[in-house]
Image (tube, grey):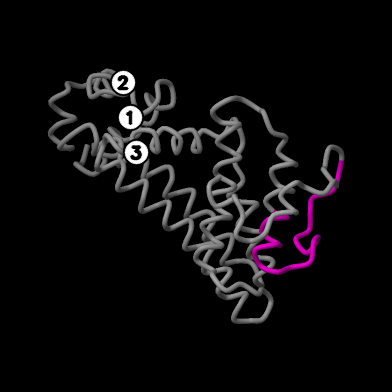
Amino acid sequence: MTPAARREAIVDAALRVANRRGFGSTTVRDVAAELGCSSGLIHHYFASMDDVLAAAFEQVAGRDLQVTEAAVAGADGPIEQLLAFFASYARTDGDWSFQLWLDAWAEASRRPALGATSRRLNVAWQRLMAEIIERGVSSGAFHCDDPDGAAWRIVSMIDGLALQNVAHGPMLPENAILEWTFTTTEHELDLPHGTLARPTGPGTSTSTSPVSSMSPMSSTESA
């Protein structure tokens, strides 16, 4: 097995263990046992367990980012790009990759390499949203004085709402999260309510969200 293949095998084993136990409880010994090798082999390829977890998180979260970037790039205009972002970024209580995000956030302050990877990818998601907004402002489709801040508020709101379901089970209906996200985004970008087409069908919410009464500089920033 080549060194690159061995590193990949170690990362894959770490992900399997983390899926069962979480990043905080995954150890070098666990990964070695999963892979059927010695702990020394893990240390030969990675300086620390922090580096193993950072590489594992990079693999999953980075792949998710690439999928969303491709979806946005394939959409025609700013409105379509927003919808593509939301469709790809949507999280559910059963979303394994978002559970890893939750674990990464929890461990970020204690594990420098994992924390640095989490921050870099989080900023990349925010920048992807900010670039959509900037293009929309340039084309006249959106009106927003602070695309960077608006992107942080929108992404943070999605993450905060999804976090409730990932951490505590399905507390919030997915259609409600979608409606609140769309309504808040429309306010941020000075779009008429309903500009972002809502999915239709059984269980789809059509009621006005409490978020609709908030200003663009609302408490969604702290979601």
Image position, residue 187 (x, y; %): 70, 62
Image position, residue 131 (x, y; %): 52, 69
Name the image quarter holding residue 168. top right
Which sits earlier in the primary sequence, circle 2 or circle 1?
Answer: 1
Residue 79 versus residue 158 in the image, above or below? below
Q: CA distance from mark 2 to mark 3?
A: 14 Å
Name the image quarter holding residue 190. bottom right
Q: Are marks 2 and 1 in contact (CB under 8 Å)?
A: yes
Q: Are marks 3 and 1 in contact (CB under 8 Å)?
A: yes
Q: Which residue is mark 1?
A: 14
Residue drawn at 67 percent across, 59 percent down: 215
Image position, residue 114 (x, y; %): 30, 41
Q: Which quadrant holds the C terminus?
A: top right
What's under tag 3, amino acid-wise? Ala
What's under tag 1, amino acid-wise? Ala
Q: Which quadrant holds the N terminus?
A: top left
Residue 216 versus residue 39 in the image, above or below? below
Viewed as shown, does residue 187 lie left or right of 3? right
Instruction: Look at the numbered disc 3 and give the secondary structure of its residue.
Output: helix
Mark number, residue 43:
none
Instruction: Look at the numbered disc 2 and give the secondary structure of its residue.
Output: helix
Q: Which residue is mark 3?
A: 56
Instruction: Look at the numbered disc 1 and give the secondary structure of its residue.
Output: helix
Task: Inspect the magenta stretch and tell me whether residue 165 lies in it.
Answer: no
What's under tag 2, amino acid-wise? Glu
Viewed as shown, does residue 120 lie left or right of 89? left
Q: Which residues are magenta?
A: 182-201
Q: CA distance from mark 2 to mark 1?
A: 8 Å
Q: Main secondary structure of the magenta part?
A: loop
Residue drawn at 59 percent across, 30 percent down: 94
Residue drawn at 12 percent across, 25 percent down: 40
Instruction: Name the one closer to the observer, 47 or 206.
Output: 206
